[in-house]
Image (cartoon, rainbow, N blue to C red):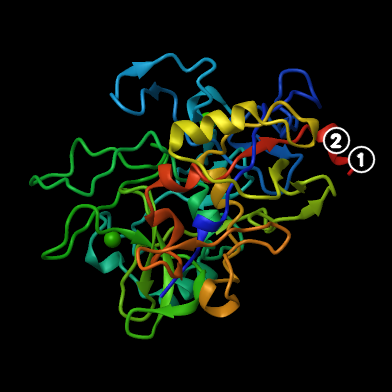
Amino acid sequence: MCAFNLWKTEVFRHGVFLPVLLSGCNADYQPVVPESTNTNTVVWQTTYAYPIVDTDQNRCYDSETGVEIRCTGAGYDADYQGNQPSYTTSSDGRTVLDNVTGLRWTQSTDVNRSGSVDEADLLSQSAAVHYCQTLRLGGYRWRLPNVKEAYSLMLFSGKDASTALGTEPTGLTPFLAPEFDRAFGVRAGERWMDVPYATGTLYVSTTMHGDATLFGVNYLTGRINGYPAERTKFYVRCVTGNTLYGQNSFFDNGNGTITDQATGLMWAQNDHSSRDWDHAIEICESATTAEHTDWRLPNVKELQSLVDYTRSPDTDGDAAIDVLFHSTGILNEAGLPDCRTGDITGLPPRMWISKIVARAEPISRLAEP
Ligand SMILES: [Ca+2]
Ligand SMILES: [Ca+2]
């Protein structure tokens, strides 16, 4: 079964986030004067409803040798700062506000408040929905995050714990800001990395044995995976605030580009093939689509923002991306049209980010589509 055919997507170019609105701010965020001097009350007002938090990648490496290289001019993720991660923990320590997205999160995975995170904190997806909906904390109306909300917390300064064994999880670096607690696989036979967090996003088709499938987010591997919705137990982190987060607002500029007015990113409408990642970078950095010269290869989180989780090859015969985008199919080893099994972020990110190019849209241009 095919979950997504992102191999069909392809070229977009990218640019630089331009400081347009306020001095000292990037184009996407306008800090609001704090209601008090208590930093816990600082609220950031986003110009965009769906701002993408940067990946927190801050180093560049040669793609062949792995040797660290200068980022300036490399065109790599770390060459573009984007919206740097920023969080504020509440005075009681129980919630964490993402100052970029406007989403507020529960700080702890210890849902039964036993003082430790263990098997008793694992919930089925339906129980997770109920838990968040009935959570009384801080006077907020909580919900289980959708997959885009949950992915907004992913920081790629983490280290993949897929192969971590050991007797203690010390030394592991989750793909999650230190403001949040850590949870690991706790049940017999599980690995440290067996810690999917539940989301409210079900796959529109089925997988494996006809199972309804839930997209779970794993902050120890940096991935999204599909899990049998009724047979998996998940950790839970509830969210509140910014109910527009994750909702795209595409506008066809009529010149081969699509602007997402929710994220502020402009994308190339057509995909483009590339030999490898370096070639994809080269294509983006030199692109002049619609006479823009600031195209870049998108980072993995920007690319995920394009995924339309209401679509799938099985249900639509097409890629899980808005129909405004022109997607090219691929042929599998048998020479047949095909797509990859599994979720998009279960794929090696370097493979699919090499397929798409994006550029940040200066907000001034959003007004003149
Ligand atoms: Ca970056
Ligand atoms: Ca507990």
Q: Quadrant of residue 29?
A: top right
Residue situated in front as seen by the camera: 285 or 263? 285
Residue situated in front as seen by the camera: 283 or 311? 283
Q: Name the residue type under label 1.
A: Glu
Is residue 83 in sight in this rendering?
no
**Separation of disc 1 and disc 2 at Cα?**
5 Å
Ligand 1 within 8 A of label 2's CB?
no
Residue topped by disc 1: 368
Check the picture and name the quadrant holding the C terminus. Answer: top right
Quadrant of the rendered image holding ligand 2: bottom left
* Residue 248 position (above or below residue 134): above
Ligand 1 within 8 A of label 1's CB?
no
> Tag 2's secondary structure?
helix
In contact (CB < 8 Å): disc 1 and disc 2: yes
x, y percentage for residue 253?
Answer: 84, 47
Q: Residue at x 60, y 49 (%)?
A: 103
> Tag 1's secondary structure?
loop
Q: Residue at x 52, y 69 (%)?
A: 201
Residue topped by disc 2: 365
x, y percentage for residue 326?
Answer: 67, 57
Q: Residue furthest bottom?
A: 210
Q: Name the residue type under label 2.
A: Arg
Q: Quadrant of residue 257?
A: top right
Q: Residue at x 39, y 65 (%)?
A: 342
Q: Is 322 left or right of 280, judged from the image as shown?
A: right
Q: Residue furthest right?
A: 368
